[in-house]
Amino acid sequence: MRKHCFNKLSFLKYCYCLVLPIERISIILFFFCKFHHSSIVFVTLVLQQPYAFRLQCRLSPQLCVVEDWNPKEEGFFVLNHLPDAQFTLRMSNLLISTIGTKFLTEVDRAVPSIIVEKSSSVKRLIVPSNCSIQFIHLHDTELNRMYFEANRALTKLIVKKCPLKEIPPSINNLTSLKELHMSETPITTIDFNYLQGRDLLNILVVEQNIVNYLTGMTESTNKSCLNIIKLRKSHLQTINLDLFQPFQTLELFDISSNMLQSLTGTLSNPELKYLSVSENLLLAFDCCSWNPIRTLVSLSIGRNRLKEVPRCLITFANVKSIDFSYNVISHIDMQDFDGLNHLEELDLGGNKLLTFEFRQELMLPNLIRLRLHESCICRLNDSEAVLERMPNLIVQFVVFSSEKCHAC
């Protein structure tokens, strides 16, 4: 079926192509096309070597799927049957070992984006300088090596579930890269030197790996435009926060679900809005030496081993949400939150509290929700006076209204 057929048949929903070998001398192509009110089957006999890839295209979303394709044996004629529109080509069980210059040169004439999935044959990715593909997603492959020539087209790279052991230095050659995602790999080290000075890179997600070491220059003059950094679900035990000094536009920093026992250095990111250090092994959180971060709106240190409320919370004077839930805090003095006049939600649930003090002179004018579920207390001392000062405050001693609060 030719390209112009897709353009003219605006009422076409999808077209499915099945290639079957017949006695090793020919193949039959079955085209099953679904229209809004009918279906048509086209059958074509082609005299050539027998292979069995399958092609299916959908108009919504604009996606073409090809399965069991072996470009070395079958060539690239399948690309001639793709629509003219800006479709993404998803290849399942792609039967080549290297996604390199020849392959990408042919493919980028047809589509701007590719997804390669469930392809155990794929072991290498080599992106040449003349490649115009903008988005590459590799998932569930045997990829163990990547190399990038100087390239201005690729803007998004996702690599998931493969034996790749490092983010290569040549990642720095992708001058237009905006998003980098690396997940479910045996990567152990991240060198931030490769990511500094990137003018366009704004999202870095490295999660579900075995990362245990971060390195880079703590006083680099090469600033970066990174807005989002997620280093989650890895094996980090300590982090020097000074490593993130070059990222002056950082807004979200998520290092949750690691094995963090300590944090050193200071965060000095003047535009930081969201900080999550939840689900780690921290015994303390000390921000007293930090410069004020007045942009922060959410601080999450839930599910750690904090024994007390961190000091110097006024560092985050405009914070709206704080989560200290499920630590081992035994005493709460609400004076520790004094000055946080924009605080709206405070979660202290899951701590086994022995004492809770809410001083009469303390006023948190915007606090509307205080969570104390599973905290061993079922009422506040002088609660009437507290609610009189802050009539909009809701204190939750249980998660669901049908539950009963149990004092320890």
Image: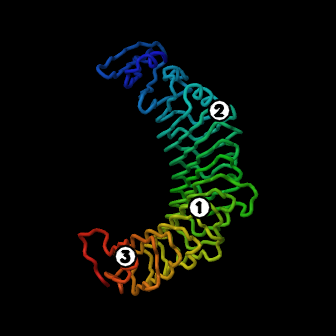
Mark 3 crowd level (few <14, some 14–19, many ≥20, 10 Å Cα): many
Q: Which mark is residue 131?
A: 2
User: Distance between the Cα atoms at labels 2 and 3?
Assistant: 56 Å
Q: Please name the amino acid that badge 3 sits on.
A: Leu
Q: Which residue is mark 1?
A: 272
Q: Residue at x 56, y 71 (%)?
A: 317
Q: Residue at x 43, y 69 (%)?
A: 345
* Residue 385, picture quadrant: bottom left
* Residue 157, picture quadrant: top right
Say what secondary structure mark 2 lies in. Answer: loop
Task: Pick whichever of labels 2 and 3 is earlier in the sequence.
Answer: 2
Say what secondary structure mark 1 lies in. Answer: loop
Task: Pick whichever of labels 1 and 2 is earlier in the sequence.
Answer: 2
Q: Please name the amino acid that badge 2 sits on.
A: Cys
Q: Which mark is residue 372?
A: 3
Say what secondary structure mark 3 lies in. Answer: loop
| Residue 260 sits above or below residue 25 on the image | below
The label nearer to you, 2 versus 3, is: 3
Task: Pick whichever of labels 1 and 3 is earlier in the sequence.
Answer: 1
Q: Are marks 1 and 2 in contact (CB under 8 Å)?
A: no
